[in-house]
Image (tube, rainbow, N blue to C red):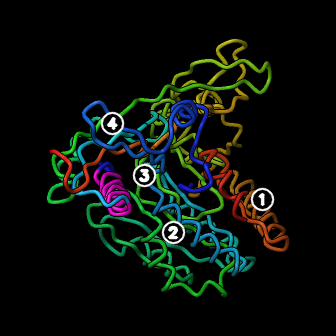
Amino acid sequence: MHELAVCQALMTQVEQVASREGAARVTAVMLQVGPLSGVEPRLLQDAWPIASAGSIAQGAALSVEAMPVRVRCLECGADSEARPNRLLCGECGGFRTRLLSGEELLLKRIELERDGQAA
Amino acid sequence: MCDTCGCNVTDGNRHPVEAGGRHATTESGREAVSVLQNLLTENDHEAAHNREHFDRHGVLAINLMSSPGSGKTALLEATIERLGREFRIGVIEGDLETENDAARIRDKGVPAVQITTGTACHLDAHMVHSALHGMALDEIDILFIENVGNLVCPASFDLGQHRNVTLLSVTESDDKPAKYPVMFRAADLMLVTKSDLLAVLDDFDPARAEHYLRQLASGAPTLTLSARSGDNLESWFDWLRHEAVAQEERVAKGETGRPSAQPEGAQLHAHAHP
């Protein structure tokens, strides 16, 4: 269960961005997570209220965009969808592929309010 | 990865970045700030710092990962016995509790620092950095970091190592690479351990384990060996010798090495900021 550690790292970044932007409150946090990051989105959702309690982002909605696993074949050049445990080319079946998407673990966007803005 | 050079923009998320500016306004009138920063940025920075430390002292750092009880410490004991006079070896041990593994390593006459993580299921770059304060890096050629026995979490945290070695013992099942793809995809070398038990555990097929590894688009070499019987240990020692020379050559050229399955963004980052 390393998702709490990941969530705490997320909180640090949210606080940095909020402070840099002069935010009074963070209302939403959007992530991109691919299955090959090794992080389980549902467990992040569970850990989020604990990690954000008492912070500028308490009560903010956490949304996670699940990224697809996509590979590019180094043999035939085709791009195709793949499964996390089967990263073969969908066209020629070759195993020499490069991952295009699927290991993201990114803070994509946050929504915030500044002082004086309506809640 | 960092949030300044764009190295965290992948093919999967490029479109939304280019479509709008960094700031936009949502339908409810709130301000949306685009960030696109890796969640483990802080860990990755500390890992890069550790890697610089290793390179400055000419140390090859190897991260050993596996499930509990697959024979990481036994492999290290056998390695120290055979290579202890050829290389100056140091070990960082990660466990939830006890100094037992570090004591086993020290019994072989090699410096060992034990990290007890309490409840944490993995080592992170900060823990390794703290442990390095208790390790005279100038007196070490190869540093092994024995991660917490766990096939899930350790794969997500860069420690600053140059290579990942993942162990799979024949008492487990040969489809573990298919069950734990994130871990096995990270391996620069897969060791099938406890080969002396293959005679009685004949449902484990090392070729099938390698087949599942290849399905992860991994070209990593695999070795089947036994620390107990000594079977094929020489191949593992040869791999280490090769890696030690490769590290020497990198250091001489002012370059560094990182596990081959590091996220693409981290590799770009290494190029952008050598």
| B154 with respect to B162 (left or right) | left
B63 sits left or right of B100 in the view: right
Point out residue A15 in the picture as x, y percentages from the top left corner. Answer: 31, 60
Which amino acid type is marked by label 4?
Pro
Q: At which x and y percent is residue A3?
A: 32, 48
Residue at 80 percent of width and 63 percent of height: B246
Q: Answer yes or no: do the residues labelled 4 and 3 have beta carbons within 8 Å?
A: no
Q: Which amino acid does label 2 sit on?
A: Glu
Residue B72 falls inside the magenta stretch: no
Q: Mark 4 points at which residue?
A: A41
Q: Residue A5: image x %, image y %?
A: 32, 56
In whole angstroms, how far apart are the C-alphas of marks 4 and 2?
25 Å
When asked about the image quadrant of residue B100, the answer is bottom left
The kind of secondary structure element at disc 4 is: helix
Q: In this view, does B251 lie above or below A20?
A: below
Q: How far apart are marks 3 and 2 (CA)?
A: 13 Å
Residue under numbered circle 3: B39
Instruction: Identify the magenta region.
Output: A4-20
- Say which quadrant the C terminus of chain A sits in: top left
Amino acid type of disc 3? Leu
Q: Is residue B254 left or right of residue B57?
A: right
Looking at the image, tell me whether mark 1 or mark 2 is earlier in sequence order.
2
Q: Do the residues at pointers 3 and 2 share their chain?
A: yes
Q: In which quarter of the image is residue A110?
A: top left
- Residue at 45% from the left image edge and 38% from the top image edge: B172
Query: In this rendering, do the residues under marks 1 and 4 share a single chain?
Result: no
* Helix, strand or loop for disc 1: helix
Q: Residue furthest top?
A: A91
The chain under label 3 reads: B
